[in-house]
C-alpha cells in the first residue's frame, strides 16, 4: 500500500513461535534454508574492532528496514548487516514501483521509508529477537551446525554486527533529531526495557535475559550524489569525534572517471543500452579528491581510536530507458556494477595498500562471494541477488560455497584462505596476507572483466510471462512472489475448494426475495494473499510473477488493523479482527464495504453494511433473518461478496498456516 507499518513486537514473536512449531519456518523461510555453519571452519572476521561470525550480510536497502527483514537475513546466515540508511527527512515520497530486477537490476529508492523513531524501534526489536532465537533454538533442539547435535549458543560463534547507515548532508546529520537517534543506537536500554514488557507468554522466559543495549558503533556514510569533498570530510569528522562512531565512507562509481567507467561498461562488458547520467561525472567526488579526504581523515580517526574505511559502494545513476519504473533517473546495480566496483577496489589499494578497510557491495551472489572474501573485503554485502527468486533462501549458498573453497584449499580460517589462494596460484611459498590480498585483487579483477557472466549478452533474459492475468483467486501457484518480497508481505493460505450456486437477494418494502445469482467457484486449495502493512508497492513480486497484474495489486490485501483499513479507504482490502464475542472480517471491494462476523460457535454468520444485516447459516448458507436499516428503499444484495468473504475468513482461520493475519488468533 506504499506505506510501511511496523508490525507490533508481540505479533512478530507470536508468529515466530507458532509458525516455527506448526510449519517449521519463520516469516515463510523454511528451517531447511536456515544457515548452519560447518563447526570445523572459522569464517569470522574483524570489523571496526568487533568480531562477526562471517563477513556476509545485506547492504543498506530493502532487506534491512523492517524487523522481519533483519531476522530473515540473520536466519539465512547474515552476520554483518548494514541497516537501511536514515536521514532527517523521514517523510519522503517515492514513486512506485521502485525496484526492477528484470535482468541486471535498477531501483529508484534511496533512504528509509519509516519515521526515524520507527526505524530505531525496528532495529531494537530485531536485535532482541535475534538474541531470543539464539536461546530458543538451543533449548528446543535446533541444530546450530551441520555436523553436530543441538549446541548451547555460547559454543557456536553467532557474533553479529549491525552497521548503521546514515545520510545525506551535514546539516541533516547535525540536527538534534539525528544526534539523538545516533546516541540511542549506542544505548537503547530504555527501549529494550519497554519491549521486555511486550514479550508474549510464548517467550515469557526471555523477558529478563540480558540484551545488548549498544546496537551499533559504526556508520557507513551515504551522501548525496554531488556532495562536495569538504562536506564529506566535515560529516566524517563529526561522526568520528563528536558522535564517537567508526566511519566507512560509501564511494560512487563515477570516481573511476568517464573514460575508464565507460570503457569498462561499454567496450568490455557490452552494456551499450545503459546511458550514464552525464551530470554524475560533473558533480560526484573525483578519485583524487576522495584519496585526499581520506588521507586527512586518517589522522583524526587514529587520534580518536576509531576505524576509518571506505565502501565500494554506491549504485550508478543512469537514465531510465524502460517502462516499469517511472523516474527519469534510476540506479543501476547487479553484474555490471560488480566490475566497476572491483576496479575501484584495485585502484584504491594501489594507493592505500592492503591494510586499509574496504567493504563491498555490487552484484554479489553465491558464485562470486568466496572470491570477494578472498581479496580481503569486509563485509561483503548483497542486495540485488536477494531480490531474485528464492530471496533470503539464496544466502546460505554463499557461505556453503565459501566453506567448500576453504576445504578445497585445506584451510580453516579466512586469513589462511586468502594466503593459500594466492600461493597456490602463483606457486609462492610463505606469502604474507597483505601481498596475497593485493595479488588476489589484481587477479580477480582481470578474471572478472573477462568472465562472460558479467557481460551484457549473458544478462538480457527477462523473467517469463505466460500471458494470463491474475485475479483474486487461483493462480498457477509457483509461489515466486513470496520469497522475492523483502518484507514477507506476500503469503499463502489454504482453503477448501468451493463451488456454490447462490441466489442474490432483493429487499423491497421490508420483504426479501431470492433472485438469480450465479456460481461462486474457487478451484484450488492453495491461495496467495498480501499483508498490506508490510507492502510498499516496490513491484518486485510483479517482476517475477509469470502472470500479469502484480500479486500485490490483484491478490486479497489484508491490513493489520481496522484503523489502517479505514485510513486506506481508496484501496480494496480486508482486515480480520476479534470483537463482540465473534471474529469479524471487514471487506472493501472498490467502493462497496461489508462486514462478515462469525459467531464463536461457528454456526451462524452475520453479513452486513450500512444498508442491511443478513444472518446466514455457516454450513448450509440458509438465510434466517434480514434486517434493513432504511425503510422504503429497494436493495439488491450480491451474495458473491458474502461467499468471497466467507472463503477468506475460513482461509485466514485455517490453523494449518501461520502468517501475519492470523498470528494473534493462535491459542
Image (cartoon, grey):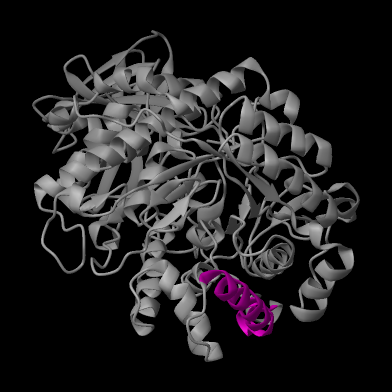
Residue 178 percent across, percent down from the top left: 60, 23
Nearer to the camera, 576 or 282? 282
Image quarter of residue 533: top left
Which residue lies most toward the bottom here?
Answer: 427
| Residue 349 in the figure: left or right of residue 666 | right
Residue 298 visible within the image = yes
Identify which residue is drawn at 50% across, 33% down: 4
Tell me: residue 527, above or below residue 339. above
Tell me: residue 204, above or below residue 469. above
| Residue 422 in the figure: left or right of residue 560 | right
Nearer to the camera, 256 or 587? 256
Identify which residue is drawn at 29% across, 30% down: 211
Nearer to the camera, 466 or 366? 366
Tell me: residue 26, above or below residue 167. below
Residue segment shown in magenta: 433-455
Residue 472 visible within the image = no
Identify which residue is drawn at 45% across, 80% down: 420
Q: Quadrant of the C terminus?
A: top left
Residue 312 percent across, percent down from the top left: 66, 57
Residue 632 percent across, percent down from the top left: 41, 9
Tell me: residue 492, above or below residue 435. above
Q: Is residue 120 magenta?
A: no
Identify which residue is drawn at 67% across, 19% down: 175
Amino acid at each position: 500500500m506504499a506505506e510501511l507499518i511496523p508490525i507490533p513486537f508481540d505479533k512478530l514473536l507470536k508468529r515466530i513461535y507458532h509458525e516455527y512449531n506448526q510449519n517449521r519456518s519463520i516469516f515463510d523461510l523454511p528451517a531447511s534454508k536456515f544457515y548452519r555453519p560447518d563447526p570445523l571452519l572459522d569464517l569470522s572476521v574483524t570489523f571496526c574492532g568487533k568480531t562477526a561470525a562471517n563477513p556476509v550480510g545485506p547492504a543498506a536497502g530493502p532487506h534491512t528496514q523492517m524487523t522481519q527483514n533483519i531476522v530473515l537475513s540473520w536466519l539465512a546466515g547474515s552476520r554483518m548487516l548494514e541497516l537501511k540508511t536514515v536521514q532527517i527527512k523521514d517523510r519522503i515520497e517515492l514513486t512506485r514501483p521502485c525496484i526492477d530486477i528484470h535482468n541486471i537490476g535498477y531501483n529508484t529508492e534511496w533512504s528509509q521509508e519509516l519515521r526515524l523513531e520507527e526505524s530505531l524501534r525496528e532495529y531494537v526489536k530485531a536485535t532482541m529477537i535475534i538474541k531470543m532465537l539464539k536461546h530458543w533454538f538451543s533449548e528446543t533442539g535446533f541444530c546450530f551446525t551441520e555436523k553436530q547435535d543441538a549446541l548451547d549458543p555460547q559454543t557456536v560463534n553467532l557474533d553479529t554486527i549491525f552497521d548503521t547507515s546514515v545520510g545525506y548532508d551535514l546539516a541533516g546529520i547535525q540536527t538534534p533529531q539525528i544526534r539523538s537517534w545516533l546516541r540511542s543506537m549506542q544505548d537503547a536500554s530504555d527501549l529494550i526495557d519497554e519491549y521486555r514488557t511486550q514479550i508474549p507468554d510464548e517467550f515469557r522466559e526471555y523477558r529478563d535475559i540480558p540484551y545488548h543495549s549498544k546496537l551499533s558503533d559504526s556508520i557507513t556514510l551515504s551522501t548525496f550524489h554531488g556532495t562536495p569533498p569538504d562536506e564529506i570530510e566535515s560529516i566524517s569528522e563529526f561522526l568520528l569525534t563528536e558522535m564517537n562512531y567508526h566511519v566507512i565512507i560509501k564511494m560512487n562509481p563515477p570516481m573511476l572517471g568517464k573514460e575508464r567507467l565507460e570503457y569498462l561498461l561499454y567496450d568490455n562488458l557490452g552494456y551499450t543500452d545503459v546511458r550514464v547520467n552525464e551530470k554524475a561525472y560533473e558533480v560526484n567526488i573525483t578519485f583524487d579528491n576522495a584519496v585526499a579526504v581520506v588521507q586527512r581523515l586518517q589522522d583524526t580517526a587514529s587520534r580518536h581510536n576509531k576505524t576509518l574505511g571506505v565502501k565500494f559502494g554506491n549504485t550508478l545513476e543512469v537514465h531510465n530507458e524502460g517502462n516499469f519504473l517511472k523516474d527519469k533517473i534510476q540506479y543501476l546495480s547487479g553484474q555490471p556494477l560488480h566490475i566497476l566496483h572491483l576496479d575501484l577496489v584495485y585502484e584504491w589499494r594501489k594507493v592505500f595498500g592492503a591494510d586499509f578497510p574496504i567493504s563491498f557491495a555490487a552484484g554479489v551472489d553465491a558464485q562470486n562471494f568466496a572470491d570477494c572474501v578472498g581479496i580481503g573485503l569486509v563485509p561483503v554485502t548483497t542486495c540485488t541477488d536477494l531480490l531474485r527468486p528464492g530471496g533470503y533462501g539464496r544466502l546460505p549458498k554463499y557461505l556453503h560455497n565459501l566453506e567448500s573453497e576453504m576445504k578445497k584449499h585445506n584451510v580453516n580460517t579466512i586469513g589462511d584462505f586468502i594466503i593459500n589462494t594466492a600461493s597456490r596460484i602463483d606457486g609462492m611459498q610463505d606469502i604474507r596476507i597483505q601481498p596475497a590480498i593485493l595479488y588476489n585483487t589484481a587477479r580477480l579483477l582481470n578474471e572478472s572483466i573477462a568472465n562472460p557472466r558479467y557481460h551484457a549478452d549473458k544478462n538480457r533474459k527477462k523473467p517469463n510471462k505466460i500471458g494470463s492475468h491474475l485475479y483474486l483467486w487461483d493462480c498457477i501457484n509457483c509461489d515466486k512472489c513470496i520469497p522475492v518480497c523483502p518484507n514477507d508481505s506476500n503469503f499463502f493460505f489454504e482453503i477448501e475448494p468451493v463451488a456454490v450456486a447462490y441466489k442474490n437477494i432483493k429487499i423491497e418494502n421490508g420483504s426479501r426475495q431470492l433472485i438469480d445469482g450465479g456460481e461462486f467457484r474457487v478451484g484450488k486449495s492453495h491461495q496467495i494473499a498480501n499483508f498490506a502493512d508490510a507492502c510498499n508497492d516496490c513491484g518486485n513480486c510483479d517482476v517475477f510473477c509469470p502472470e500479469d497484474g502484480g500479486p500485490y495489486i490483484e491478490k486479497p490485501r489484508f491490513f493489520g488493523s481496522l484503523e489502517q483499513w479505514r485510513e486506506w479507504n481508496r484501496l480494496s482490502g480486508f482486515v480480520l479482527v476479534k470483537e463482540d464475542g465473534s471474529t469479524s472480517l471487514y471487506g472493501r471491494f472498490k467502493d462497496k464495504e461489508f462486514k462478515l462476523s462469525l459467531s464463536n460457535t461457528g454456526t451462524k454468520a452475520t453479513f452486513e453494511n450500512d444498508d442491511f444485516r443478513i444472518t446466514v447459516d455457516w454450513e448450509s448458507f440458509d438465510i434466517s433473518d434480514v434486517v434493513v436499516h432504511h425503510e422504503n428503499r429497494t436493495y439488491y444484495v450480491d451474495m458473491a461478496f458474502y461467499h468471497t468473504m466467507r472463503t477468506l475468513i475460513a482461509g485466514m482461520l485455517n490453523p494449518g498456516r501461520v502468517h501475519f493475519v492470523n498470528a494473534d488468533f493462535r491459542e
